[in-house]
Image (spheres, rainbow, N blue to C red):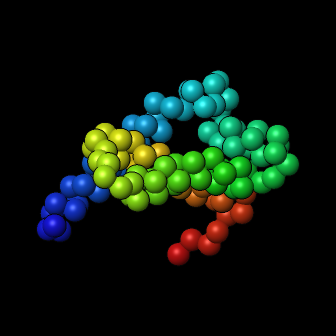
Amino acid sequence: MTQSEFKLIFANQVMKCETTLNNKRKEYTGDNLDRLSAFKIAASLQGCTPQRALVGMMAKHIVSLYDMCYAKNESFKKEMWEEKITDSLNYLFLLAAIIREEAPYEQN
């Protein structure tokens, strides 16, 4: 794969991530202005931190990707791969936001 091909894949993936996050915002936060409210509520219900609540939810997507990668004699459509990869990346973006909000890290 050339550098140009990789850059295109990267740019397209970031666009998919942004579109998905924007489309699902209302579904997961309702009218709440706090974009991270679903993780804070889940944390409260589970008696843990928002980070732990998020990674618990993210685990489902990671396990699904793992299962797809190790599936024998089975292939998956491009759309399925894209959905699982996009969801996993979006959880990482949301985790970065939670970490930044709760314990701002040093910026270089």
The percent position of residue 62, horizontal first and vertical second, equals 51, 54
Q: Quadrant of residue 30?
A: top right
Q: Residue furthest right?
A: 47
Q: Quadrant of residue 20?
A: top left
Left or right of 58: which side holds 86? left
Front-most of residues 28 and 79? 79
The answer to whether one can see residue 80 in this image is yes
The answer to whether one can see residue 89 in this image is no
Front-most of residues 5 and 35? 5
Residue located at (69% from left, 55% from top)? 51
Quadrant assignment for the N terminus: bottom left
Residue located at (51% from left, 32% from top)? 24
Q: Is residue 3 above or below residue 43?
A: below
Q: Is residue 8 above or below residue 31?
A: below
Q: Is residue 34 above or below residue 51?
A: above
Front-most of residues 19 and 34? 19
